[in-house]
Image: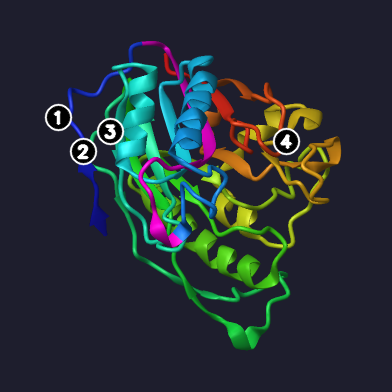
């Protein structure tokens, strides 16, 4: 396992309220430093230059600031510089954490902004699983199998008013229905499922949140998208529940997929691929769940192409 660095000295763990607010947010290419392999900011990503990238970060900050979450999981962030720059726009209460992943193609990582310090440094696993997995329905050619790990993830441990919690952040390989990527994503799901099982055995309540790049067949999105994979089922097993069931189906959209390429968002182009999964001990404490869809999606917008998921957890 690799070990992340902490940006600042860690004060004693604490929660200042009886309600904890989590936010899951894919912030779409939150890059400030130029990354050559992806040509971003540049022609290889949404933001053509540094000015656009800075504008985008300000838009992301404005969305987050509406809700003042205690813990924010960020997907598609470049590095700790970007995490800290975003935190500086929000509040000095936030401390940024990031453990670099292994996606050298896009340069994207998952990062953490938190008002509550972890009780240990973030860590990740280099474990892999073989694909296609047994019982896969992805349709991938079995002769093209291999092994896959999770290039973008971290584990962060917390003490929430005496509740020992493990937050597992994920950003799985993209394209929900592509057979080859579907098969790799199922292998990634097995890696995450192993982490879940390990931390439950160690006495932690568990949250898995991130961009799964896949649908949940048990909790259908607003367009009733059905998975070709078993990714969500593998990660959930019989231990985790997708909190999105508490959101009315007509509001279950976290990502705009412009499938006809006309640069205009229509109702049939929203899918739910960002998920928050929790163990039973946390599920019983959930006060509310929401998906903020408060900005319009279109080509040329400065907001993310994803919407944030918010979860309030009672801690008293």
Looking at marks 4 and 2 on the same chain, the residue that comes earlier in the sequence is marked by 2
Q: Which residue is mark 4?
A: 298
Residue 260 part of the magenta-drawn span: no
Q: Which residue is mark 3?
A: 118
Mark 4 vs mark 1, foreground winner is 4
| Side of 87 where 150 appears, left or right | right
Label 4: how many residues lie within 10 Å, few (<14), some (14-19) or many (20+)? some
Inter-mark Cα distance, 4 to 3: 37 Å
The residue located at (52%, 37%) in the rendering is: 27
Q: Which residue is mark 2?
A: 6
Mark 4 vs mark 3, foreground winner is 4
Secondary structure at numbered mark 4 = loop
Looking at marks 4 and 1 on the same chain, the residue that comes earlier in the sequence is marked by 1
Quadrant occupied by the C terminus? top left
Label 1: how many residues lie within 10 Å, few (<14), some (14-19) or many (20+)? few
Whether the residues at callouts 2 and 1 have beta carbons within 8 Å, the answer is yes
- Where residue 305 appears, as percent x and y from the top left, is 63, 38
Please give the range of residues in magenta: 17-37
Inter-mark Cα distance, 3 to 2: 10 Å
Q: Which residue is mark 1?
A: 9
């Amino acid at each position: 396992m690799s070990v992340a660095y902490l940006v600042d000295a860690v004060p004693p763990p604490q929660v200042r309220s009886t309600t904890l607010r989590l936010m899951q947010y894919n912030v779409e290419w939150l890059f400030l430093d130029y990354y050559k392999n992806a040509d971003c900011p540049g022609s290889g990503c949404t933001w053509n230059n540094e000015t656009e990238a800075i504008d985008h970060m300000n838009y992301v900050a404005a969305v987050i600031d509406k809700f003042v979450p205690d813990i924010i999981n960020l997907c598609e962030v470049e590095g700790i510089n970007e995490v800290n720059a975003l935190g500086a726009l929000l509040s000095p209460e936030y401390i940024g954490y990031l453990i670099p992943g292994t996606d050298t193609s896009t340069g994207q990582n998952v990062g953490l902004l938190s008002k509550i310090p972890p009780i240990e440094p973030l860590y990740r696993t280099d474990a892999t699983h073989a694909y296609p997995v047994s019982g896969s329905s992805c349709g991938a050619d079995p002769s093209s199998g291999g092994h896959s790990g999770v290039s973008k993830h971290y584990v962060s441990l917390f003490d929430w008013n005496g509740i020992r919690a493990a937050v597992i952040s994920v950003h799985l390989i993209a394209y929900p229905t592509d057979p080859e990527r579907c098969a790799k994503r199922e292998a990634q799901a097995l890696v995450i499922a192993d982490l879940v099982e390990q931390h439950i055995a160690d006495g932690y309540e568990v949250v898995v949140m991130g961009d799964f790049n896949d649908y949940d067949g048990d909790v259908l999105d607003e367009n009733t998208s059905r998975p070709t994979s078993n990714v969500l089922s593998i990660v959930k097993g019989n231990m985790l529940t997708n909190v999105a069931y508490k959101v009315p189906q007509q509001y279950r959209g976290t990502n705009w997929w412009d499938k006809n390429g006309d640069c205009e968002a229509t109702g049939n182009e929203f899918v739910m691929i960002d998920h928050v999964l929790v163990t039973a001990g946390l599920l019983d404490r959930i006060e509310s769940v929401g998906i903020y869809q408060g900005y319009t999606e279109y080509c040329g917008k400065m907001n993310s192409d994803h919407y944030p998921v918010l979860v309030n957890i009672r801690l008293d």
